[in-house]
Amino acid sequence: MNLKLLGLDSKTHILVTGGAGFIGSNLCEALIKNGNKVTCLDNFATGHKKNIEHLRSNVNFTLIEGDIRNLDDCEKACKNINFVLHQAALGSVPRSINDPITSNEVNVSGFLNMLVAARDANVKRFVYAASSSTYGDSKSMPKVEDAIGKPLSPYAITKYVNELYADIFGKTYGLETIGLRYFNVFGRKQDPNGAYAAVIPKFVAQLIQHKSPIINGDGSFSRDFTYIDNVIEMNIRSIVTENKNAINTVYNTAFGERTNLNELVTLLKEYLSNFDPEINDVEIKYGPARIGDVPHSLASIEKAEKQLGYNPQHDIKKGLKEAVNWYWENLK
């Protein structure tokens, strides 16, 4: 993706929190390629040094190993920063159900620390990772930004609280904020390992090893799977926009189509079997549905298209093909 075409000035200094994680490391890489000065803040709780190792020798890249739960680390990271792309968080609905206290400490207290640090450093704009989980039990489809339901997990509560805090900091302190409600982001560098691995990299890794993926429920649950390049575009458009009506609000960050889990696995098997035909014969198994899971998720991206000029280029098939190619090279 050519960020210059989106109007991003290469002289801009940008802080990416959680910059060694899946989304954060992809943002760091895109920004460095654009010639930007990038500071990465990460405590490596879920991020990986290997994701940013190739950036470490670049003079425009600075790594600060720190924790957003520590205000001093946040203040250090925000020094001389023009824009913040705040990606640091503890994701996963099941993780938050198992350990709501830590999820709250990182996602709420850590978020507040970053807002305070950004405000005090006179950062121009604070763009942050919100979540589609905020829609909770809302049954309306597609999901429209101003119509949400009650949260269904501690994680969802923390991400909604982020939006409330960002709104207050905009109104009270004049800090420009934009929240991006991510819908099931996938792509290169997404970790397939661990108890809380996202479904696409987890299934890809299992299929490569000829192990049977286990679908939670009957496979009818659907998601608006969103490729990483679409997410990068939204973050950059949030930085460069000069539309005053586009700030101090939230946007769905998605493609605007939904795919159920049965369809997803079928596509994964099709694309992976181009490398290994035996993957076509791997059996798919089914288990109980997960507590706190939203049955269906589909985003309206009309607001982002209108206000930010968002124009996502990767649908589920194009994104999966690129992701599968990356995983085949890096996992086999």
Image (cartoon, rainbow, N blue to C red):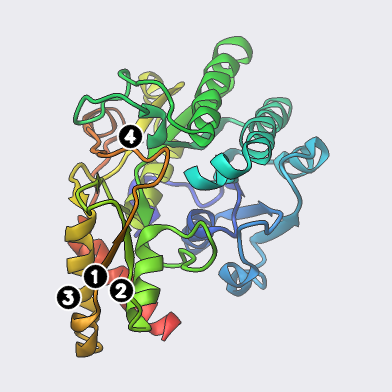
> Position of 251 compared to 14: left or right?
left
Residue at (56%, 58%) from the top-left corner? Answer: 21
* Pointer 2 residue: 324
State the SS at label 3.
helix
**Contact? badges 2 and 1 (CB < 8 Å):** yes
Residue 26, image x, y percentages: 47, 60
Cα distance, mark 1 to mark 3? Answer: 5 Å
State the SS at label 2.
helix
Q: Residue 80's image quarter? A: top right
Which is nearer the eye, 168 or 278?
A: 278
Instruction: Tell me the quarter of the image containing the C terminus.
Output: bottom left
Whether residue 92 is visible here, answered yes or no, is: no
49 lies above or below 165: below
Which is nearer the eye, 68 or 107?
A: 107
Residue sticking out furthest to the top:
172
* Pointer 4 residue: 252
Q: Amino acid at mark 4?
A: Asn
Res. 270 mark: 3
Closer to the N terminus: mark 2 or mark 4?
Answer: 4
Cα distance, mark 3 to mark 4? Answer: 29 Å
Res. 156 mark: none
Closer to the N terminus: mark 2 or mark 1?
Answer: 1
State the SS at label 1.
helix
Q: Amino acid at mark 3?
A: Glu
* Pointer 1 residue: 268
Q: Amino acid at mark 1?
A: Leu
Cα distance, mark 2 to mark 3? Answer: 10 Å
Residue sticking out furthest to the right:
72
Q: Nearer the viewer, mark 1 or mark 4?
A: 1
